Amino acid sequence: MARRPLPRILSSGSAQIARSREIARTAADSATDVLHPLITVSRGLRKLAASARAKWAATPKERRGPTLLLVAACVLVVALMPYGPLLALVTLMAAAAWRGRERPVVKTGPDDAEIARLKGLYEALVPYFSVADDPAPLFAHGGDWSGAFTEYAFDEDGRPTRLKIAYPPYFTDGEPAARARIEQLLHAKSGRGREYRFDWDEEGNRLVMSVLPALPTTIAAQRFVTVPGETVLGFTDADAVQRTVPVVAADGTEDAPAVVWRTGPRSTEPHLLVVGQPGSGTTSLLRSIALQALPHGDVLIVEGGGTGEYACLTGRDGVLAVECGLSGSLASLEWAAHETERRLIAANRARQAGHPAPEDTRRPLWILLDRPGVLGDLAAADGRPDPQELLQMPLRHGRAAQVTVVVAEQFDSVDTLSEAVRTHTRARIVLGPAAPDQIAAVLGTEPHTTPTPQVPAGRGYARLGSGPVLRLQVPATPDPYDDATSEAHRQAVLELLPERRAAATMAIEKITVRSPEPAPLPEPAPAPRAEPDPGPAPLHAPVPAEG
């Protein structure tokens, strides 16, 4: 049996209904636009009438008669004035339009999406901040989150940027493992890819989680305002340090909070260890340190990688040598050890004689060693001593001899560092992406922030001695001979390089495997027996006292 087609009114009814709805919606929008002033005035008149009614209800009964009399007198005066009724009508319409205007809605609390996120965070923290024996738990499944979260703020995407949490006193906030679990949970629930800082108030049982802004990467190598013996390692958060230095960034001159490392005889952290991933900026940091050290001292560079990253410093004034090979590196480091010993002997003899230290012992000497693990492997294969063994003298007595050692190594070769390097490098820097346990292994403690998996070159953490862990952004100091370097950064580095020496010979020519013995200094005059000893005993060449 053949099917009959549906009536036309049934087959095309849905399309006509949709078209009619669209026409009605367009007409309503057009009417709303045309009648918007009338709607605004009507809304204002309604608000004015409501305000007048509220004021009349709040007026005491004994004052209502005089109030009516005053209003009637005002109306009579306006009616008798020329153009009075018209002016009164215009004033009333203007006041109604002002009261009826649409005002922006002021947000006084979290919206539904933010409330749902806060509830999720609250429920996720219940297993960690509650026990079964608590008679009035602050955290309980299905409980009120407003009592636990006293402060909160969100970004435009609805993710929390600041959260203040009140936790019960019995939570073991003194245990690093317990705190790490809470920090990991909040990091995962609040959104990954951002760097969070956690401030624990153990006395008040409060935890503040805040999102840290990214450190600026627009600061390149330049002359920093420092005194001799101070080196700017990089820049950090404004509330982390008390010192700022004027810098020239991409958007102009500004005062940036700097991480300043102090070296010299009175330094508590005379040597530096830098650890990072490949491409994290460790070599760029060593170049920055060398450029800051050259105006006031001499620099000896030993590059274990052999990639020529320090070729721009070859032959410059103040650069004693730039060694990449094994033989030259061993000879340079052995000379540095003998030079440290010579300085100690000369300074102690001068001190025993009551004279100031010689000028050649007061000029700072910087030893920059990049990738010593590679040189150690080459030395082991060739049957030679590890170059790090030659650093024991500069590391142990470098502070008194104005010798500073900076060692840079990668994470995969940290285990090749000698015990002397691990012991005497109390200033530590970690660059590039790293796990919290890797950062803690280098710095001695975990940072108060959550490291992100992807960071720009030169971003990391710094800790000077037993101080706090600081976020760090190293000033951009790329190799000016690299084709990938931008023109602005290339010119910035080239302007900081010293002039090349007139002679074509390198300073390494005076670095021999065995340095000559220092010239004998005059013996100190004998001191009276009643006077105390004129100075400390020499470290390496004791002078016999008068009998």
Image (tube, rainbow, N blue to C red):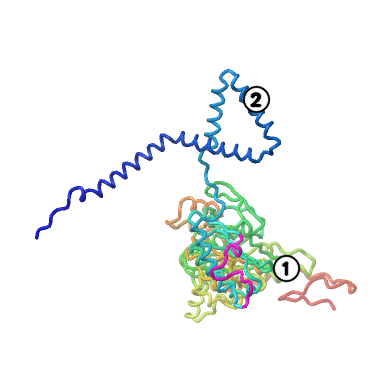
Which one is earlier in the sequence, the residue at label 2 or at label 1? Answer: 2
Q: How many marks?
A: 2
- Farthest residue to the left: give it: 1
- The part of the chain drawn in magenta is 133-150
The amino acid type, in three-letter code, at marker 1 is: Ala
Q: Residue at label 1? A: 347
C-alpha gap between disc 2 and disc 1:
103 Å
Pointers 2 and 1 in contact (C-beta within 8 Å): no
Secondary structure of residue under mark 2:
helix
- Farthest residue to the top: give it: 82
The residue lying at 84 percent from left, 72 percent from top is 526
Q: Position of residue 408 (x, y in %)?
A: 54, 68
Left of 159 or right of it: where is 68? right
Left of 13 or right of it: where is 539? right
- Disc 2 versus disc 1: nearer the observer: 2
Q: Residue at label 2? A: 73
